[in-house]
Amino acid sequence: MLSRVFFVVLSLMLFAGLALAEGLPSGSVKTVQGEVFAERQGKVLPLVKGVRIFAEDLLVTGPDGSLGIVLRDNTIFSMGPNSRLSLDEFVFAPVEGDFSLLVSMIKGTFVYISGIIAKLSPESIHLETPVGVVAVRGTRFAAKISGK
């Protein structure tokens, strides 16, 4: 009996350590088509449905690519071909009242549908483009950004 308890406690500690080392995921990939990848900590990772997305990920679609992600607060981003989006920061801790979403839409086509953060703390959302910041006043918008 004691060995089972020890094993369970050890397993939980290992799992918690792995979760802290990797960080809490911000969301996940829901749809993917064509060439789509993430740049994370200097590595290029191909994206497929179900893969977790993290703060500081750079999401990229190729000429035939499209991507749909859902963040933990139910915010949705869709990206068309030749798009680049940086998920610079994501904090969703409703119990603590701590919220933050900072996204840089670098180039391409995007659709944004707001989630819970926009309802609870709209001032915590910053959607940056090369020419300015989008203020979240509604629940959705589409953007086409030309760039490098």
Image (cartoon, rainbow, N blue to C red):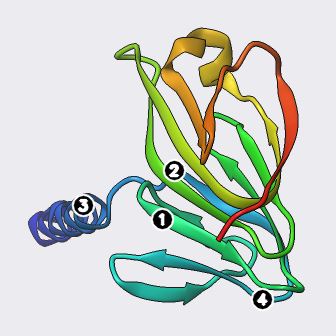
CA gap, disc 3 to disc 4? 37 Å
Q: Earlier along the polypeptide chain: callout 3 or callout 1?
A: 3
Image check: 123 left or right of 100? right
Residue highlighted by disc 1: 57
Residue at x 66% of width, y 74% of height = 60
- The tag on residue 12 is 3
Residue at x 51% of width, y 34% of height = 101
Helix or strand or loop: what does disc 1 sit on?
strand
Q: Residues within 10 Å of mark 2 (few under 14, many from 20)?
A: many
CA gap, disc 2 to disc 3? 22 Å
How far from the left and from the top, in percent, is residue 63? 85, 85
Image check: 22 left or right of 47? left
Residue at x 39% of width, y 53% of height = 24
Residue at x 65% of width, y 19% of height = 118
Quarter occupied by residue 22:
bottom left
Q: Earlier along the polypeptide chain: callout 2 or callout 1?
A: 2
Q: Residues within 10 Å of mark 1 (few under 14, many from 20)?
A: some
Q: Earlier along the polypeptide chain: callout 4 or callout 2?
A: 2
Q: Do callouts 2 and 1 mark residues in contact (Cβ within 8 Å)?
A: yes
**Which tag is nearer the camera, tag 3 or tag 1?**
1
CA gap, disc 3 to disc 1? 27 Å
Classify 62 as above or below 73. below
Viewer-proximal residue, 79 or 105? 105
CA gap, disc 1 to disc 4? 16 Å
Q: Residues within 10 Å of mark 4 (few under 14, many from 20)?
A: some
Residue highlighted by disc 2: 26
Q: Earlier along the polypeptide chain: callout 1 or callout 4?
A: 4
The amino acid pointed to by label 4 is: Glu
Helix or strand or loop: what does disc 2 sit on?
loop
How far from the left and from the top, in percent, is residue 132? 60, 34
